[in-house]
Every structure is written in structure tokens, then in C-alpha cells.
């Protein structure tokens, strides 16, 4: 049976008088694709920023693999095996796709500064190992053509792919996708559904995604959580959520 | 055009990407090694100065061009390196040991300066480093027992195994050796995780953090390496000056160093050398110009700093990628000759950007 990978308890966050996240409690099981939906401003991205520790929660707790991560500095999150993408791509604009993905391997660095200054054989060996993993991800997401291109020159859809690729280079246990299909056309969105499945099955990565495209959500996800005004409306299978009266009210009004 | 056929991942790691590069850089090295055979001591001295600038430039480029942190205080690191080196020499330390100690000491100071400036970027960081430079300048001026204050401090002759490295050929080779060593270490850093972490911080702090990069640590390391190289340059610069006084390391020196990396081309090691040649030769150019210009302009007291500032501004507006960027465009023009399109290098603006969390 599957076990709980990530759980939050009574998670709250407010910016001044605005309650972005209110008492959010949910559990994500290993190997599932968990989607978070909700109208604009429902607190979806805020939850991501809380998990990746960019925000400090006002109250509540987040546990990953049974350990609390509420007090861990943000750069340690990746080491635990949590990777994320951003809503509008946050890539290293002036570097090539390859370099971007190699930065994703940073958490697996074992060399120290002195050996890097001298580029000792150990560093070179590590670089080659990094490269193998990177190439593996490139194959999975079909990015071969873009390997040596600078990010700034790439079309938007490819940038989004590269961001996912970079996150995968961490070899995460949990991948947070912030609106993977925003700004993509119908065909590209179709592809997103395929590679979410690939990542989930080939790498066994658990995925939490924030998404607006209900088609994609119902195709790709095992469970869905609906949010409105920072609070949880309902959690359940995609069909349940689509027909849930509370959810319909939040989207369509009374 | 050259198409490189890649058959091993190793090729992407190697410093030279193809045999052509190996040949041209090899030739360049041969030319500079043979320099003393056909140059007289004045030009050798000028060239040695260019190398010293380049060493400091490599350090500053790592910080400004690769980590994206602007420093207006690098004259202070240059000064610290120079004074520590001269002080240790006067205490009878051998040259290599004094030089390395001066560099390590400066690197430590750099790391310490890096720590409190961690949360600052852009203009605020520039001002903080400027303040640091002023503090160091005052410290040097008033700590008379060590630095000699405004009276100055005589730099002992450079000696190695009883051989006087003074000026001329031996000193030229010393500078060349140190410069090549610095360049290689900088290139090594840039092809390993630490260098990529710096680049990550430059392009997007927030996603660098999500990739597991410790911002504080990496920035501090960048400051330390940058200061270490600059300190090394300072040690050599001390010999070039012969006599150290606080007014050799002023705000103008810091601006000169920054001008070097910006005019050369931010984000490329080639740029450092273009910049170093430019900065090394500009004062000579200005001196020649002074004689030909009408006295009203030619004899203006602030001509040199004024021109430095003007050139910096012009480069920032018209060629932000510096001399190296211009050189690449020219090279591409010839490589693609009849097909070159002017729009290739038009900068595309991207308006999409994640709302910054911090």
C-alpha cells in the first residue's frame, strides 16, 4: 500500500489582512498525481511557496516523509528531494539548456571548492556523471535539439519544458508543477499530459500540480483538491470534484 | 563556419572545444612568451601592467559578470593585497609565500565583506562596497605604524632565489605566470558546480534557491575568490608602483576596474583581456591626446576621470556586451558573410517574469 509522502496540517498564511491560505490540511501519497485547482487568488501558488519554504507559514506544519520541514532553510528543500517549477518560467536566461539542467544537479555535488579550482579528476568524473543523468532527462522530454541553445532564444513552450527538465535533474521524490500548461496551445497541453504520465511512471516521482485546465487535470491526476479564498473546499477524484456543489459555486457563483 | 562533431561528453568539459582553438591559443601563448625578445623594457612594463589589470579583472568578472554582484570597492582589495605583500616582504618573507599569503588574506577579508552584504543587490551593494573601500582607504592612511600613512611605504625589491625580479623580463614572466594560473582557475571554477551556482544566482536568485543553491554561502565564496584574485594583482601592482601610498587606491581605481569588465564585456573571460588592454593603454592615449587638443580642453584637471566616465556610459548605452560582444558580432558577420542579418542580435524583450517573492 502507498504511504503518505507529504502532509500539511492547519497551514495558514496571511499578508496583512489578506488570508491567502487558511487552515489547509491535506495529504499526498507516494506515487500519486495530486492536482490543486481553484479560482485566481485561491492560494494555490502560496501553498507551493510554503512547501518550498519561500514563505514562512503563520501557523501549521508541513511534513515530508514524516519529518517536519517548516523550519528548514529554502535551499535545503531541494536536498530533501522536492523540486519545483515556476508559473512563468524562472530559468537562467543567459545560459544554455544544458547548463540550466546541470545546475539542477547542484544538490548532488560532492566536490569542494579547492578541487574545483584545480579541476581535479574527481570533478571531471562528477561532471560526466551529471551529464549522463541530464542526457537521460533530455531523452525523456525530447529536448535534444535545444541542448546547446541559450534560454533567451527559446520559444515559451520549450522554456516550460526546460524548467521541468531542470527540476527533474534533481531526481526529486516530489515534483511541484506550477501551472505546467499556462501559455501553451492545445497540442502542447496534450503533450504535457503525456509527460506527466511518463515522469510519474518512469521515475516514480510524486507530482503535485497547480492547474487551471480541467481537461488536463482530469486526464492526469489521481486526486484533486479544490481551493477557494485560501480554504479547502473538497478533495477527491477528478469526477467527484467536477460535480461537487461547493466547487461549482466557487467557480460559477450561486 | 565550423561545425563540431561531438562524440563524447568529455568534449563539452574540455577547455578547448576544438583543435582550431588549441592552435590559436597556443600561438597566442607563444607570442606573449616570446614578447621579451622583440619588445623593449618600456613596452614590457606596460604589458606587465595589462596582465596585472587582467588578474584583478578576472576576479572582478567572476563577481560582477558571473555572480551579478556589482562592487565599487575593489580598489580596497587591491590595496590590501599590495600592503600585505609589501609588509610581509619587508619582514623578510620570500616572494611566493608573501604573494600567496597576501592573496589568502584578501580573500578572507572578501568573504567577511561578502557576509553582511548578502541581502543586498544592485545599487545598494555598490554603495556598501564603496563604503568599505573608503574605510580601508582611511585605515591605510591612519595606521601609520604598519602602512606608513600618507608618507607611504617603500616596496622591497622582488627577489626570488637571489634573482632580482625587479622590472623588465623576469617581472614580465612573473606577471604572465600568475595571470595564466588565475585564468585557468577561474575557467575551472566556471565549469564546475560552484561556477554554475554563481551564474544561477546572477540569472534568478529565487530559482537558484529552489535548485538547492545556498545563496549566502555562494555569494560569500564569490566575494572571497574575487578578492583573492584582486589581492594577488595588488601584490604584483605593489612592485609596479614601487612606493605605496593611500592615494594610489581611490574610488577612481575602483571605477577603472569596473570600467574594465564592463567595457571588455560582462560575462566572458575574453572580455577581461579586451578590457585590460583598453584600461592599460587608455592613460597613454589620453596623454598623447592632451598635447594635440587645444589647451582649454587638453589641460583640464579632471580630463581622465571624465573620459573614463563618458566611455562607461557610452558602452552601457550602445554596446552593453562590451568589446567582446562587438567582436563576436564582427566575427559572425564574416562567418556568415552574405547571409548575415542585422536583426540576429536585436535584443528581444521578455515581459513575462514570475512575481518576485522577495
Image: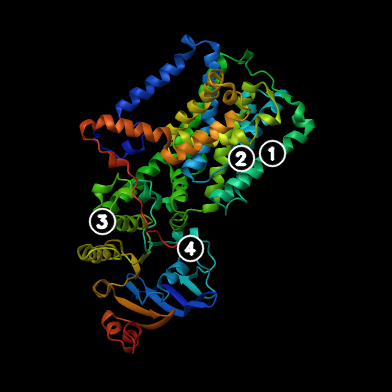
User: Circle 1 marks a residue in which chain?
Assistant: B
User: Circle 2 marks a residue in which chain?
Assistant: B
Check residue B73 in the rendering and tell me which mark sits there, or answer none: 2
Secondary structure state at the residue bearing disc 2: loop
Q: Which residue lies under the disc numbered 1?
A: B136
Q: Which residue lies under the disc numbered 4?
A: B357
| Residue under the point 47% across and 34% down | B263
Q: Position of residue B26 (x, y in %)?
A: 38, 22
User: Circle 3 marks a residue in which chain?
Assistant: A
Q: Give the quarter of the image for residue B351.
A: bottom left
Check residue A141 in the rendering and tell me which mark sits there, or answer none: 3
Secondary structure state at the residue bearing disc 3: helix
Q: Do the numbered discs 3 and 2 sit on residues whose CB atoms are within 8 Å? A: no
Q: Do the numbered discs 1 and 3 sit on residues whose CB atoms are within 8 Å? A: no
Q: Tell me if mark 3 has few (under 14), some (14-19) or many (20+) residues whose alpha carbon lies within 10 angstroms of its own.
A: some
Q: Do the numbered discs 1 and 2 sit on residues whose CB atoms are within 8 Å? A: yes
Q: Is residue B230 above or below residue A137?
A: above
Q: Foreground: B66 or A77? A: B66
Check residue B358 in the rendering and tell me which mark sits there, or answer none: none
Q: Position of residue A87 (x, y in %)?
A: 37, 64
Does residue B320 show up? no
Amino acid at each position: 500500500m502507498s504511504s503518505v509522502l507529504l502532509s500539511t496540517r492547519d497551514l495558514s498564511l496571511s499578508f496583512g489582512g489578506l488570508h491567502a491560505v487558511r487552515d489547509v490540511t491535506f495529504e499526498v501519497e507516494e506515487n500519486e498525481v495530486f492536482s490543486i485547482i481553484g479560482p485566481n487568488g485561491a492560494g494555490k501558488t502560496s501553498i507551493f511557496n510554503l512547501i518550498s519554504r519561500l514563505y514562512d507559514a503563520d501557523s501549521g506544519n508541513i511534513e515530508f516523509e514524516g519529518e517536519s520541514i517548516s523550519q528548514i532553510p529554502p535551499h535545503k528543500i531541494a536536498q530533501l528531494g522536492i523540486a519545483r517549477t515556476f508559473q512563468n518560467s524562472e530559468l537562467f536566461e543567459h545560459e544554455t539548456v544544458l547548463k540550466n539542467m546541470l545546475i539542477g544537479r547542484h544538490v548532488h555535488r560532492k566536490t569542494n571548492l579547492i578541487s574545483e579550482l584545480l579541476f581535479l579528476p574527481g570533478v571531471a568524473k562528477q561532471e560526466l556523471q551529471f551529464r549522463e543523468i541530464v542526457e537521460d532527462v533530455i531523452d525523456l522530454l525530447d529536448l535534444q535539439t535545444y541542448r546547446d541553445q541559450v534560454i533567451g532564444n527559446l520559444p515559451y513552450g520549450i522554456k516550460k519544458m526546460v524548467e521541468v527538465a531542470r527540476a527533474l535533474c534533481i531526481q526529486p521524490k516530489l515534483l511541484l508543477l506550477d501551472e505546467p500548461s499556462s501559455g501553451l496551445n492545445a497540442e502542447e497541453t496534450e503533450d504535457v499530459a503525456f509527460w506527466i504520465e511518463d515522469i510519474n511512471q518512469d521515475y516514480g516521482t510524486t507530482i503535485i500540480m497547480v492547474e487551471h485546465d480541467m481537461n488536463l487535470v482530469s486526464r492526469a491526476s489521481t486526486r484533486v483538491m479544490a481551493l477557494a479564498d485560501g480554504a479547502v473546499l473538497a478533495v477527491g477524484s477528478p469526477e467527484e470534484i467536477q460535480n461537487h456543489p461547493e466547487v461549482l459555486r466557487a467557480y460559477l457563483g450561486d | 563556419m565550423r561545425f563540431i562533431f561531438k562524440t563524447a561528453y568529455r568534449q563539452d568539459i574540455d577547455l578547448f572545444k576544438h583543435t582550431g582553438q588549441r592552435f590559436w591559443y597556443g600561438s597566442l601563448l607563444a607570442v606573449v612568451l616570446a614578447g621579451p625578445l622583440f619588445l623593449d623594457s618600456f613596452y614590457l612594463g606596460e604589458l606587465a601592467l595589462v596582465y596585472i589589470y587582467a588578474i584583478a579583472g578576472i576576479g572582478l568578472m567572476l563577481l560582477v559578470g558571473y555572480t551579478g554582484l556589482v562592487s565599487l570597492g575593489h580598489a580596497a582589495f587591491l590595496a590590501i593585497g599590495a600592503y600585505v605583500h609589501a609588509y610581509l616582504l619587508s619582514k623578510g618573507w620570500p616572494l611566493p609565500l608573501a604573494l600567496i599569503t597576501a592573496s589568502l588574506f584578501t580573500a578572507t577579508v572578501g568573504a567577511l565583506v561578502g557576509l553582511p552584504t548578502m541581502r543586498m543587490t544592485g545599487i545598494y551593494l555598490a554603495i556598501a562596497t564603496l563604503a568599505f573601500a573608503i574605510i580601508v582607504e582611511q585605515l591605510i592612511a591612519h595606521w601609520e605604524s604598519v602602512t606608513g600613512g600618507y608618507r607611504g611605504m617603500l616596496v622591497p625589491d622582488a627577489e626570488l632565489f637571489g634573482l632580482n625580479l625587479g622590472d623588465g623580463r623576469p617581472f614580465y614572466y612573473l606577471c604572465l605566470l600568475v595571470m595564466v594560473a588565475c585564468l585557468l582557475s577561474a575557467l575551472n571554477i566556471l565549469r564546475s558546480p560552484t561556477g554554475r551556482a554563481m551564474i544561477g544566482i546572477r540569472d534568478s536568485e529565487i530559482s537558484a534557491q529552489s535548485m538547492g543553491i545556498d545563496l549566502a554561502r555562494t555569494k560569500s565564496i564569490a566575494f572571497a575568490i574575487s578578492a583573492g584574485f584582486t589581492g594577488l594583482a595588488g601584490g604584483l601592482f605593489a612592485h609596479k608602483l614601487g612606493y605605496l601610498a593611500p592615494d594610489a587606491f581611490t574610488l577612481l581605481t575602483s571605477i577603472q576596474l569596473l570600467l574594465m569588465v564592463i567595457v571588455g564585456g560582462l560575462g566572458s573571460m575574453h572580455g577581461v583581456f579586451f578590457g585590460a588592454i583598453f584600461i592599460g593603454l587608455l592613460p597613454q592615449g589620453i596623454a598623447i591626446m592632451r598635447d594635440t587638443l587645444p589647451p582649454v580642453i587638453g589641460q583640464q584637471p579632471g580630463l581622465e576621470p571624465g573620459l573614463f566616465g563618458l566611455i562607461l556610459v557610452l558602452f552601457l548605452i550602445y554596446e552593453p556586451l562590451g568589446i567582446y560582444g562587438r567582436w563576436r558580432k564582427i566575427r559572425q558577420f564574416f562567418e556568415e558573410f552574405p547571409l548575415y542579418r542585422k536583426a540576429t542580435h536585436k535584443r528581444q524583450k521578455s515581459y513575462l517574469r514570475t512575481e518576485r517573492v522577495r
